Amino acid sequence: MIRGIFYWVFGTVFTILVAFAFYILYPILRINPNIPHLIVKFWSNGLLTFFCGADIEVIGRRNIDLSKNYIIVSNHRSHMDIPLASVAVPLQFRWLSKSSLFKIPVFGLAMKIAGYVSVERSRSISASRSLNRVKDVLEEGKSVWIFSEGTRTPRDELGKFKRGAFLLAKDTKKPLLPVILVHTDKIFYRTYIVRRRTVKVIVCEPLYYNDFIEEKMSDRDVMSRMSQSVRELIQEKYNSAC
């Protein structure tokens, strides 16, 4: 209970201060677009390890080639997934985030400054424009992180994957990096009860769109096959780690 109150009171103040730092440092951030991600990394580490007292275990870090950029695909269990991913994965990546988050005062503008990509999932035109922006991010040499279920899934079984990440893999031929986030949903027992946990990040070997192509398969069939394979892989690794 005490840790929970500590998190919500001081963690909120910490978050607001970090968000304001984006405003103060805006001229510098425009010069070096990599700095915002480093600020997010600092914020994430503070929330997870200091305010929540979490220990972080990373499995498969060797599967990341720092000279490459990736389409990162993962499960999504908790709002603590974003801090964990930002701390544990040593890549310059940008989030594909729902548009409503960008409307939050202070925080939303900080997300824009950080280069995150907004998507309004209910509108196909908006989603298409977002994917084009993600392609620009990939061409700039950055990675992009996508929660393929499109939303948080509180169940142990993964929801249906959206096709956006796999369409990007087809169009850009960038490697797709499956990542599994484990136990982030165990940090908060209740809203004001925070428990110390060991949270895990499992990084799998990268996958390529062309590896899923067979003779006479349509693009839709290849994307479906790739999506199903990635979903099964993430589900299997998640079940084994829990």
Image: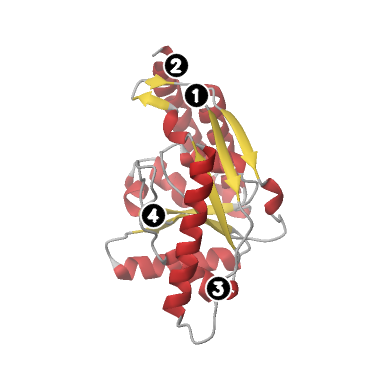
Q: Residues within 10 Å of mark 1 (few under 14, many from 20)?
A: many
Answer with left or right where residue 165 lies relative to residue 29. left
At 46% from the left edge and 57% from the top edge, which residue is drawn?
A: 231
Observer-side mark, 2 or 3, equals: 3
Is residue 165 visible from the viewing direction of this image? no
Q: How far is disc 2 from disc 3 in space, using C-alphas?
A: 47 Å
Q: How far is disc 4 from disc 1 in space, using C-alphas?
A: 26 Å
Q: How far is disc 2 from disc 4 in space, using C-alphas?
A: 31 Å
Residue in the foreground of this view, choosing between 155 and 38: 155
Against 94, residue 226 (above or below) is below
Q: Residue furthest top?
A: 2
Q: Residues within 10 Å of mark 2 (few under 14, many from 20)?
A: some
**Residue contact at pointers 1 and 3, CB within 8 angstroms:** no
The residue type indicated by label 2 comes to Arg
At 46% from the left edge and 64% from the top edge, which residue is drawn?
A: 227
Q: Which mark is residue 149?
A: 4
Is residue 183 visible from the viewing direction of this image? yes
Observer-side mark, 4 or 1, equals: 4
> Residue 55: where, in percent of width, then height?
59, 27
Q: How far is disc 3 from disc 4 in space, using C-alphas?
A: 21 Å
Marked residue nearer the N-terminal end (2 or 1): 2
Could you tell me which secondary element the residue under label 4 belongs to?
Answer: loop
Marked residue nearer the N-terminal end (3 or 4): 4
> Residue 214: where, in percent of width, then height?
54, 80
> Residue 42: where, in percent of width, then height?
59, 35
Q: Residue furthest left?
A: 122
**Residue contact at pointers 2 and 1, CB within 8 angstroms:** yes
Q: Which mark is residue 190?
A: none
Q: How far is disc 2 from disc 1 in space, using C-alphas?
A: 7 Å
Residue to which mark 1 is pinned: 52
Observer-side mark, 2 or 4, equals: 4
